């Protein structure tokens, strides 16, 4: 017998999932709750993992897993902290470079003035004989 696309996935309400988790938390076994609700114990174990990880925030939608807002905020914070670190390193490098130029080069180079405004004097050419 061949299984086709005619078998649709069942969608369970959040209320059913929460009720099942509360039953398990009250001391009933997963197997007993699975028999009562006519569900797979593996499915209840998966729900239990999400329930333990997220508590009341578990099971947010209908059949779709979403990225928890806390996780996306943590990713954004980590990205911003990396950017701050990178910019801090760039600023430190530029400060050191500026200090180097102040110490080793004449002030005209550091201040942006022209290093030499005078034209060099040409030597007079010797006359041809």
Image (spheres, rainbow, N blue to C red):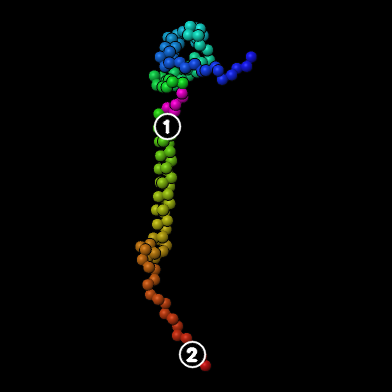
Q: Nearer the viewer, residue 17 or 125?
A: 17
Specify start and end residues of the magenta stretch as a single range.
Answer: 64-68
Q: Which residue is mark 2?
A: 127
Disc 2: CA contacts within 10 A as few (<14), some (14-19) or many (>=20): few
Where residue 107 sits, quadrant-wise, is bottom left
Q: Residue 103, how many percent across, how many down? A: 40, 61
Can I make out residue 25 in this image?
no
Q: Residue 30, how many percent across, how many down? A: 50, 10
Q: Residue 123, how many percent across, how many down? A: 45, 83
Helix, strand or loop for disc 2: loop
Can I make out residue 76 in this image?
yes
Q: Nearer the viewer, residue 79 or 64?
A: 64
- Answer whether labels 1 and 2 touch (C-beta < 8 Å): no
Q: Quadrant location of the N terminus?
A: top right
**For the residues carrying marks 1 and 2, which lies nearer the camera in this image?**
1
Q: Any magenta on residue 44?
A: no
Where residue 121 sits, quadrant-wise, is bottom left
Q: Which residue is mark 1?
A: 72
Helix, strand or loop for disc 1: helix
- Residue in the picture at 42% in, 12% down: 19
How many marks overall? 2
Where residue 113 sits, quadrant-wise, is bottom left
| Residue at the extreme right | 1
| Residue at the extreme front | 6
- Residue in the picture at 50% in, 9% down: 38
- Residue in the picture at 49% in, 90% down: 127
The answer to whether 42 is drawn above or below residue 123 in the figure is: above
Q: CA distance from mark 1 to mark 2?
A: 83 Å
Q: Residue 81, how many percent across, how many down? A: 41, 39
């Amino acid at each position: 017998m061949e299984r086709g696309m005619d078998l649709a996935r069942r969608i369970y309400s959040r209320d059913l999932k929460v009720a099942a988790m509360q039953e398990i938390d009250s001391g009933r076994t997963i197997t007993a709750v699975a028999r009562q609700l006519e569900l797979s114990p593996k499915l209840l174990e998966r729900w239990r993992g999400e329930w333990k990880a997220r508590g009341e925030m578990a099971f947010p939608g209908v059949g779709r897993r979403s990225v928890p807002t806390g996780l996306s905020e943590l990713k954004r914070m980590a990205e911003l902290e990396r950017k701050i670190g990178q910019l801090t390193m760039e600023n430190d490098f530029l400060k050191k470079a500026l200090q180097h130029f102040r110490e080793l080069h004449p002030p005209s180079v550091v201040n942006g003035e022209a290093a030499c405004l005078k034209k060099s004097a040409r030597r007079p050419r010797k006359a041809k004989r």
